[in-house]
Image: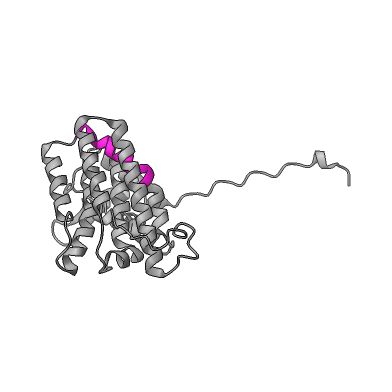
Amino acid sequence: MTGTMNELTPLASPAPMRRKRTDEIVDAIKKTIVEHGLQPGDRLPQERELIEQYAASKGTIREALKALEVQGLIRIRTGPGGGAFIETMSEQRAMSLLSNYLFAKNMTIGDIYALRKVLEPLVAVSAMTNIDDAGYKRLTDIIAIYDHEPADAQERWDQRMAELDFHAVVAEYADNALLAFTCRFLQTLLKELAVCRDIYRQPKPVLRQQGIAYQRELLEAMKAGDSTRVHQIMADHMAYAETAMLDLQAELTGDFLHDPVARGRGERRRKVVS
């Protein structure tokens, strides 16, 4: 050997992976949609124009358009007058796609509340300056759905869904669209997560007065414009809700001895809140 370790030529950094041409065209079309302010119902250029514009093959253009359609951003119509038209992705579809991604991730109630405890107080403060009398009436009317014991199983289920709807309405008034969407998505997960659905179906009487008290205090603080109090009330509400849900889960699964959160609480009566 004629050299030393210090004389060895350092290994070259790996070259960045080249993006697929299809992905590049998808991003370019998205950029065009935004820059030109295209609205739902507007039509993209015809296939032949896209082929020329992006110097791509027919197959590549069709693959790019199909990707945009799967993402819910366009709709492809065939026949006379057909083509690729701008589509509005609904919030429900966006949440459905995210739910599919998380389907096999073994999410837990704790995972959801780890985010809710942080984000719900923020969204309540954000909504405070925007909510109007009609909004407060909506929230008061929602509370009236579950401020009494249910007459049957269907009313019990409806009440528990309404408890989550209260928070969805608060999020509607938030300034931050991403924050509001995330909170509503977490609320939707609670409606769809199998263990939560099992908890909500339990026929036992439910004490929810503490949760309602938090919500009524929240509305008073929001009307008063007290952001510090709004944040604290919602933080307390979410901490209480998490504890109640974990207690109910432990009771449902009989896992008191193995659940450090539930252990030591004995047979204290559980409360379901949203």
Quadrant in which residue 33 is drawn: top left
- What colour scheme was applied to this rendering of the protein? one colour
The residue that appears at 89% across and 47% down in the rendered structure is: 1
What is the x, y in percent for residue 188? 28, 56
Please, which residue is most extreme toward the top here?
225
Q: Is residue 140 magenta?
A: no
226 versus 145 height, above or below:
above
Please, which residue is most extreme toward the right here?
1
Observer-nearest of 33 and 125: 125
Please, which residue is most extreme toward the front here?
267
Q: Is residue 63 visible?
A: no
From the viewer's perspective, is 150 left or right of 194? left
What is the x, y in percent for residue 211? 27, 50
Observer-nearest of 195 and 93: 195
191 versus 2 height, above or below:
below
What is the x, y in percent for residue 210? 27, 49
Q: Is residue 126 magenta?
A: yes
The stretch in magenta equals 116-130
> Dominant secondary structure of the magenta stretch?
helix
The residue that appears at 18% across and 36% down in the rendered structure is: 131
Quadrant in which residue 67 is drawn: bottom left
Observer-nearest of 45 and 196: 196
Quadrant in which residue 204 is drawn: bottom left
Q: How many numbered markers are drawn?
A: 0
From the viewer's perspective, is 85 left or right of 68? left
Q: Is residue 43 visible?
A: yes
What is the x, y in percent for residue 92? 24, 55
The residue that appears at 39% across and 48% down in the rendered structure is: 115
Observer-nearest of 210 and 184: 210
